[in-house]
Amino acid sequence: MNNKHALVCGSSKGIGASTAIELSKLGATITLLARDKDSLANVLDSLDTSKKQNHNFIIADFDDPFKLKDTIDQHIANNPTIHILINNSGGPKPGPIVDANVEDFISAFNRHLICNHILVQAVVPKMKEARFGRIINITSTSVKQPIKGLGISNTIRGAVANWAKTLSFELGEFGITVNNILP
């Protein structure tokens, strides 16, 4: 992972933070992305720097895709190639699908698909130039089998899985892989 740069979303805690810490131990330079500055600073302090990596973070909220686009476009314009993108975000509101309102679906769709797509569009041009890239989406086991009480998540995560498969067809020839992890 030396000389590789990873953008890890939802990295202020949980799976995202753990992923960032492990990638830094392997020698990758990490850009953390989440909405809480203090939590990001704490994780930043936990990252390994034994390979002289210069880690950083971006404050962004997946509840505002258009602001995320502006923020990530600025970051990409002023930073080296991101070789690894870890798409990760907290799950949608739980509950039966029959009780879900349209706004909850739109919010989940924006958070889990639109924001992922914005990030992919930002990083893929430089990945193509490098002829290397890894796009990893942290989704859910509900992609394989819907989980009772998680109606919105079951629906949206299925859309993310199909989006990712489509990307893999389109990007494979450039040395870019796209995979989903189902915790």
Image: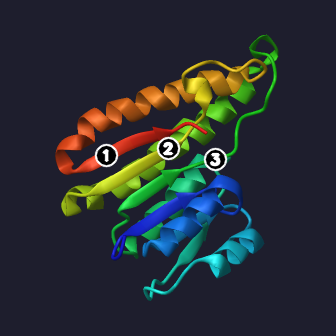
Q: Which of 91 and 75 is in front in this view?
A: 91
Instruction: For marks 1 and 3, give the CA distance.
Output: 20 Å
- In the image, taking residue 114 as reference, residue 120 lies left or right, namely left
Could you tell which of marks 1 and 3 lies nearer the N-terminus?
Answer: 3
Question: How many angstroms separate mark 2 from mark 3 (CA)?
Answer: 9 Å
Q: Which residue was labeled with disc 3?
A: 89
The residue where tag 2 is placed is 137
Residue at (50% x, 74% y) in the render: 25
Q: In this view, does 7 lie above or below 28?
A: above
At a point 44% along the width and 65% down the height, the residue shown is: 6
Would you name the residue on which mark 1 appears? 177
Q: Label 3: how many residues lie within 10 Å, few (<14), some (14-19) or many (20+)?
A: many
Q: Where is residue 149 in the image (x, y as percent from the top left)?
A: 79, 20
Q: By what rule are the colours in the image chosen?
A: rainbow
Residue at position x 54%, y 66% from top? 22
Helix, strand or loop at mark 1: strand
